[in-house]
Each structure stands twice: as C-alpha cells, then as structure tokens.
Image (cartoon, grey):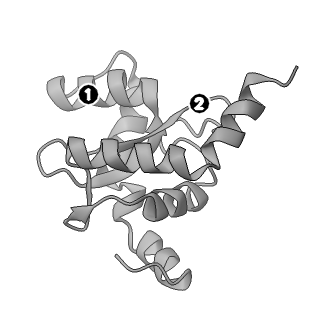
Amino acid sequence: MRAKVDVDREYQRSVGYWAIRQKNWAKRGILFHGKPLTAEIFKALLDFQDHRCAISDGDERWLKLAAEHDHKNGELRGAVDGKINHHAVGTYEKYGHYKSPIHEALLAAYLASPPAQSTKFLKFLKARGIKY
C-alpha cells in the first residue's frame, strides 16, 4: 500500500485538483495583481518557494500549503501551511501579537515582505513566460 503522501501528490498533479482549487480561490476572492488567482500562478509560487511554507519553511510533503491572502484587498501574499494560515496569521493580524516572540517575529517578517508580492517573484514569472 502506498503512503498517503504519494497518493496526495498523484492527485495534486491532476487537472481536476487544480480546477477545484482555482474555483475555491475565485469564490473566496483571492487575487494576484487585481485578477483572480490561477493555478498556473500558484504552481509557480510553489516552485518559487521551493514547495515550502513561506513562514515556517516546512516542507510541502508534510504540509498542505494554502494560498494566504490579505483579507482587506484579496491580494495573494504567499503559500503558507494551512494551519499556520488559519491560526497564526489570522491571530497576528487581528490582535497584533502571537503566542511566542519567535513566531511573532516570523509572522512580522512574512507580512512585511510577502513572497508573492516581491519583485523577485514577478521576475520569476516573467522568466517562465507567465503573464499576470
């Protein structure tokens, strides 16, 4: 029997998986430069971040990376572990602090310079011929 991680990876390579995620992003109003986030751009972001969480640097093999976005304007900020996105980012944005100073520093650094909004990422997209 194959490990769950292998099955998940196989499913993530399928067109259906990305179509469902793209529909979900559209419903939630997640944008990239004012336009709905596409699977092509999110996959490029995953490659840009080496398939690692932008905050914890955890490996995608063990995490489900979510499209983390600014709830005020809908703009994509980065690919982040779903649990961190739900608990840590939301808490930090709402209250301005988090449980530990170490995590708080990581969150502050991420929010000050989100990977999806960096000029390096835009150059990365351009080099791959991806229009946004």
Residue 95 x, y percent position in the rendering: 16, 23
Of residues 97 and 14, the one nearer the viewer is 14
Q: With 45 as the anchor, is 9 left or right in this view?
A: right
Residue pictured at 19% horizontal, 66% vertical: 34
Residue at 39% from the left image edge and 24% from the top image edge: 101
Q: Nearer the viewer, residue 104 or 36?
A: 36
Marks 2 and 1 close (CB-CB < 8 Å): no
Q: Residue furthest right?
A: 1
Q: Which residue is mark 2?
A: 63
Q: Position of residue 87 (x, y in %)?
A: 34, 21
- Count of numbered badges drawn on the protein: 2
Q: Position of residue 64 (x, y in %)?
A: 54, 32
| Mark 1: secondary structure | helix
Q: In the rendered view, does 6 fall on the left or right side of 42?
A: right
The quarter in which the N terminus is drawn is top right
Q: Quadrant of the C terminus?
A: bottom left
Query: N-terminal of the two: label 2 or label 1?
Result: 2
Residue in view at x 46 percent, y 73 percent: 120
Q: Residue furthest left?
A: 72
- Residue 90 is marked as 1
Say few, some or many: other residues with alpha carbon within 10 Å of mark 1 (under 14 / 14 to 19 / 20 or more). Answer: some
Mark 2 nearby-residue class (10 Å; few <14, some 14–19, many ≥20): some
In the picture provided, is 43 more to the left or to the right than 14? left
